[in-house]
Amino acid sequence: MISCEQARNICDKAQYDEAPLKDKIKLNLHLMWCKECSGYTRKNQALTSLCERAGLNSLSESEKEEMRKHLGQNNDL
Ligand SMILES: [Zn+2]
């Protein structure tokens, strides 16, 4: 797990496409459970979408499914 500081650092790098793929994935995982950093990135919407695209596009279907499970309490409604 990465710290909030690291997450924001990666997000800043990802804006310029300088973050390694592994870091982008770590960032996205972090954003899933850290509301603080989610809020931080949401304030910078262009940055957020870049980070998300960078991370999500690089995930396999099974990894996306894994993410949905982490997110997905609402799926049972
Ligand atoms: Zn955080």
Image (cartoon, rainbow, N blue to C red):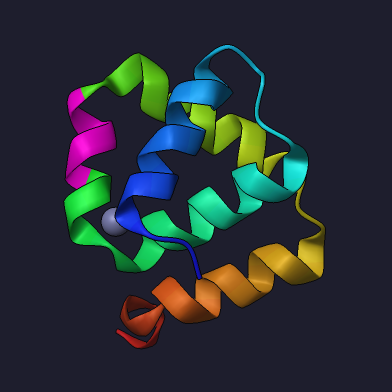
Range of the magenta residues?
39-43
Q: Is residue 72 above or below residue 58?
A: below
| Main SS class of the magenta portion in the image | helix
What residue appears at the point 33 percent right and 69 percent down from the top-left corner?
A: 33
Please state, as top left, top right, bottom left or bottom right, where the C terminus lies in the image.
bottom left
Q: Is residue 37 above or below residue 29?
A: above
Q: Give left or right: position of 34 versus 31.
A: left
Q: Give left or right: position of 28 versus 22.
A: left
Q: Nearer the viewer, residue 50 or 16?
A: 16
- Tell me the quadrant of ligand 1: bottom left
Specify whether residue 73 is painted magenta.
no
What is the number of callouts on the image? 0
Q: Nearer the viewer, residue 45 or 77?
A: 45
Q: Nearer the viewer, residue 33 or 57?
A: 33
Q: Give left or right: position of 6 versus 39.
A: right
**Residue 21 falls in which quadrant of the image?**
top right
Q: How far from the left and from the top, in percent, is residue 6?
A: 43, 47
What residue appears at the point 47 percent right and 62 percent down from the top-left corner?
A: 2
**Residue 18 falls in which quadrant of the image?**
top right
Q: How far from the left and from the top, in percent, is residue 20?
A: 73, 36
What residue appears at the point 58 percent right and 56 percent down from the top-left corner?
A: 26
